[in-house]
């Protein structure tokens, strides 16, 4: 059974206000649970202390597997499994492998990164994630605090002083 959290959050109308509020919350040593925005905000990750994604490393590994699958598969097919000579062409026509090798590299990297992204973020079929406020996918910016980790009255006064347009509490 899922564990419920009591949260308090503030909604902001502008990303600059949100950035200033996150910087101030960090300076005030308030434990931010999460920040939600309708689009990526440049400079927000370093302020929150988030490290760079390692998804590109996974993409390289998946692409390498696709390259090896294509090249080794075609090499085995054309040299061992079904060797045929057409018009004096070699048994191992490496330049002819390049298009298929490229396509499988891209295919394996794309599918592998999508699957990895979904697994790491707990997404997929049948997963129901709580929605804090529907407007944060449209035009609002949100800082969310877990009430069990912070003083709710201090957070509420912080949100008021930082220019939050709305302050709400919710159980998710």
Image (cartoon, grey):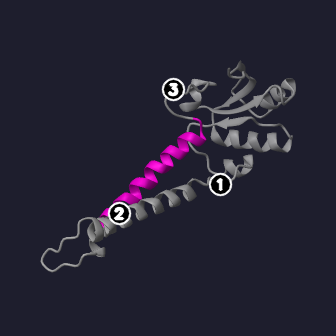
Residue 114 shown in magenta: yes
Q: Position of residue 71 (x, y in %)?
A: 37, 67
Residue 109 shown in magenta: yes
The residue sitting at 72% across, 30% down in the picture is: 164
Instruction: Name the outermost residue toward the left.
Output: 87
SS at mark 3 in the image: loop
Q: In this image, 98 relative to 41: left or right?
A: left
Q: Is residue 100 above or below residue 118?
A: below
Nearest to the observer: residue 165 or residue 8: 8
State which mark lies toward you, 2 or 3: 2
Residue under circle 1?
52
Nearest to the observer: residue 57 or residue 149: 57
Give the numbered dot on residue 73: 2
SS at mark 2 in the image: helix
* Dot 1 or dot 3, earlier in sequence: 1
* Dot 1 or dot 2, earlier in sequence: 1
Residue under circle 3?
126
Q: Is residue 43 above or below residue 37?
A: below
Give the residues drawn in magenta, as a range.
Answer: 99-122
Crowd band around label 2 with a 10 angstrom C-alpha radius: few (<14), some (14–19), many (20+): few
Give the numbered dot on residue 77: none
User: Cβ–Cβ below 8 Å for labels 2 and 3?
Assistant: no
Q: Is residue 110 above or below residue 157?
A: below
Q: In this image, 75 relative to 32: left or right?
A: left
What is the C-alpha distance between the residues marked 1 and 2?
35 Å
Crowd band around label 3 with a 10 angstrom C-alpha radius: few (<14), some (14–19), many (20+): few
Q: Position of residue 49 (x, y in %)?
A: 74, 49
């Amino acid at each position: 059974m899922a564990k419920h959290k009591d949260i308090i959050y503030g909604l902001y109308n502008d990303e600059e206000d949100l950035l200033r509020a996150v910087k101030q919350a960090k300076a005030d040593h308030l434990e931010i649970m999460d920040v939600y925005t309708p689009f990526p905000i440049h400079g927000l990750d370093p302020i929150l202390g988030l490290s760079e994604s390692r998804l590109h490393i996974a993409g390289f590994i998946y692409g390498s597997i696709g390259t090896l699958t294509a090249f080794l598969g075609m090499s085995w097919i054309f040299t061992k499994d079904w060797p045929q000579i057409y018009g004096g062409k070699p048994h191992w026509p490496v330049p002819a492998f390049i298009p298929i090798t490229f396509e499988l590299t891209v295919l394996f990297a794309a599918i592998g990164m999508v699957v990895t992204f979904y697994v790491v973020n707990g997404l997929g079929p049948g997963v129901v994630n709580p929605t804090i406020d529907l407007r944060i996918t449209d035009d609002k910016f949100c800082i969310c605090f877990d009430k069990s980790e912070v003083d709710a009255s201090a957070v509420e006064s912080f949100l008021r002083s930082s220019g939050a347009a709305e302050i709400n509490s919710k159980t998710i």
